[in-house]
Amino acid sequence: MPKLKTHKGLRKRIKVSARGKLVHKRSCAGHLMSGKSGRRRQRLRRKLAMTGSLARKAALALGLR
């Protein structure tokens, strides 16, 4: 059985934190910021840790588990 290749597009969007969690940028933070409140824009700047089945699928695609 051949080894699975790492998904390069996912690799560029997700980082692994020091504790091994998968961290990604939030959606809706790319453009059109004038219609969003400052509080919301501030929240969108923060990174988000992946959880649950989505994190497991991403880890498999990245070859981490």
Image (cartoon, rainbow, N blue to C red):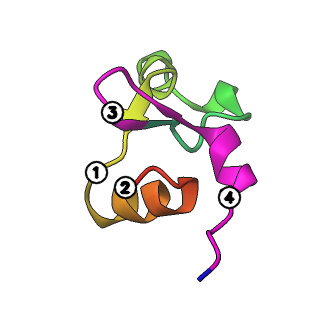
Q: Which mark is residue 51?
A: 1
Query: In the rendered structure, which disc, 1 or 4, sits on the residue that comes first in sequence?
Result: 4
Q: Amino acid at mark 4?
A: His
* Mark-to-mark CA distance, 4 and 3: 18 Å
Could you tell me which secondary element the residue under label 1 belongs to?
loop
Callout 2, which amino acid? Ala
Residue found 30% across the figure and 66% down from its top: 53
In the image, residue 26 above or below residue 5: above
Q: Residues within 10 Å of mark 3 (few under 14, many from 20)?
A: few
Q: Secondary structure at mark 3?
A: loop
Residue receiving disc 2: 55
Q: Is residue 51 magenta?
A: no
C-alpha separation, residue under disc 2 versus residue under disc 1 = 5 Å
Q: Quadrant of residue 52?
A: bottom left
Q: Answer with left or right where residue 37 lies relative to residue 20.
A: right
Q: Amino acid at mark 1?
A: Thr
Reading the image, the residue beneath label 4 is 7
Residue matched to label 3:
20
